[in-house]
Amino acid sequence: MGVFTDVVELFCEQCSTLPSHVLAGAAFAALIVLAVVINVLKQLLFKNPNEPPVVFHWFPFIGSTITYGMDPYKFFFDCRKKYGDVFTFVLLGKKTTVFLGTKGNDFILNAKLKDVCAEEVYSPLTTPVFGKHVVYDCPNAKLMEQKKFVKFGLTSQALRSYVPLIVNEVDQYVKNSGAFSAAKGPFDVVKAMSEITIFTASRSLQGKEVREQFDTTFAQLFHDLDMGFAPINFMLPWAPLPHNRKRDRAQRKMAEIYMGIIRKRREAGCKKDSEDMVWNLMSCQYKDGTPVPDIEVANMMIALLMAGQHSSSSTISWIVLRLASRPEITEELLEEQKRELGEDLPPLTYDGLQKLRLHSQVIRETLRLHAPIHSMMRAVKNPLPIDGTLYVIPPSHNVLAAPGVSARSEEHFPNPMEWDPHRWDTMNLNEEGEQVDYGYGLVNKGTGSPYLPFGAGRHRCIGEQFAYLQLGTITATLVRHFKFRNLPGVKELPRTDYSSLFSKPWSGSLVEYEKREAAANGKA
């Protein structure tokens, strides 16, 4: 013991001669090592048999955040091999329990409102972008009413009116954009499709006044507001950072623009002259008879613009990238239009689009492999027992459904990672199952399906009809204008950027276009 004491005294004596900043650094390093050791020992020695296994991680708080964030699907499939369909990982200090497969989708997306809460997870990120008193910044009952307003506004008459507007926007973009000024050449897919998506959505769903704003100041506001989805905002949504200050200014300014549009329409006598969503929401009332306030109309329109833009621009970008890798599919699409609509390719219509089965299958197959949202999370409010196991998920956890995992699984889709629109030739394109009304009209529960690109349950995306219409119209119009192929020497698709709430192809992804003869002569 005397020798040990002498060694300790000698160590302390040596430390006393070191500079203070070196001592501070050494102490900090020692704390990190101690935290890692304690964290590892807790995982190895203190396992709760009544909770799902925890994915091994070295660092507390960080947990599996980096591995998950870099490639969620690789993370899910790797964990599935090791732990099974149910496991827990640490995401920025929060224990998050994943339940994979169709049973997991049903368990989480169809859970009772008293047991899980989406608002608690998403509101800190979405409220600064969308605005107050809409979507996740209001009671669930009010959100269901707002979804009903939008869903019932997407009438067949409205959808029919959108097709020629979308076609015209694509035609004008192809004609006037520098991206397609030559007869053929490379173009930035993500950039071009993002612009086409925002122009088509703003002209059809949002209204002509909003579309006109994108030729002036709206584009910069949209960009600044979009920065509200920066990854750091998952942790620090209200931090006084430069991009957050720009986000907040853009949100206020965009809301003012929408309210200005509403005010001018009211001053003009509210004579409806189009089927855009602003007109629809202006006439809506909540169940208690209260008209939807103009600021809430404005914020709902911002939510529709932002959420719809990300999902649709990502999907149409992947469609073009996939068509470039399979040029023969592009030619099949053109032949389908000639066969079903007429050899002279008459103007696209809503009814005509319904005849284009392969076009629909291209969209479905792309969404199967490239759903814009890879993770759907809920906060647990009451203990959740998992049937057939000893596991009970405690209220301290979040739960996570990943429908894209079942969509990429062999048991549901043979050769799942192969992009093959023809796999849907013999598959039922319509969901079957129980219809339920969560407060915004009857919808298919759909939670047992392996194909859920728009989610399921009470939080299923209400823009699904418009998304299919927009994607179908853009795809059909582009096929009339172009042939697509990969650049020479390029054989692989670009990687997926998972850094935001919505996944998408990496920016700067190039493919080669070639104008068709009719398009080059201005006849398309």
Image (cartoon, helix red, strand yellow):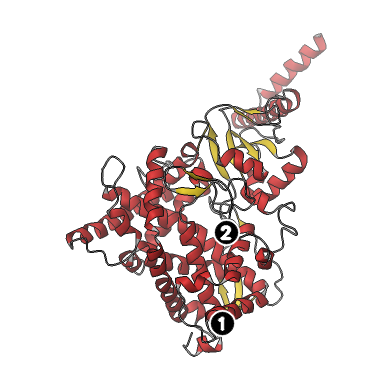
Question: For numbered disc 2, what is the local secondary structure?
Answer: strand
* Mark 1 closeness class: few <14, some 14–19, many ≥20 residues within 10 Å: some
Kind of residue indicated by mark 2: Lys
Q: Is residue 41 above or below residue 435?
A: above
Residue 504 numbered mark, or none:
2
Between disc 2 and disc 1, whose residue precedes? 1
Question: For numbered disc 1, what is the local secondary structure?
Answer: helix
Total count of labels:
2
Whether residue 391 is visible: yes
* Mark 2 closeness class: few <14, some 14–19, many ≥20 residues within 10 Å: many
> Is 420 or 129 nearer to us in this picture?
420
> How far apart in space, not on screen, are marks 2 and 1 (Cα)?
32 Å
Q: Position of residue 74 (x, y in %)?
A: 70, 50
Whether residue 245 is visible: no
Which of the image's four quarters has the N terminus?
A: top right
Q: Position of residue 221 (x, y in %)?
A: 37, 58
> Is 101 or 251 nearer to us in this picture?
101
Q: Is residue 168 above or below residue 258?
A: below
Residue 331 relative to residue 300: left or right? right
Kind of residue indicated by mark 1: Lys
Quadrant hosting residue 269 = bottom left
Residue 395 relative to residue 281: left or right? right
Identified at 42% across, 38% down, the residue is 140
Q: Which residue is mark 1?
A: 338
Identified at 61% across, 74% down, the residue is 511
Q: Position of residue 228 (x, y in %)?
A: 45, 50
Q: Position of residue 98 (x, y in %)?
A: 64, 39
Work out which residue is located at the far top of the displayed protein and give it.
2
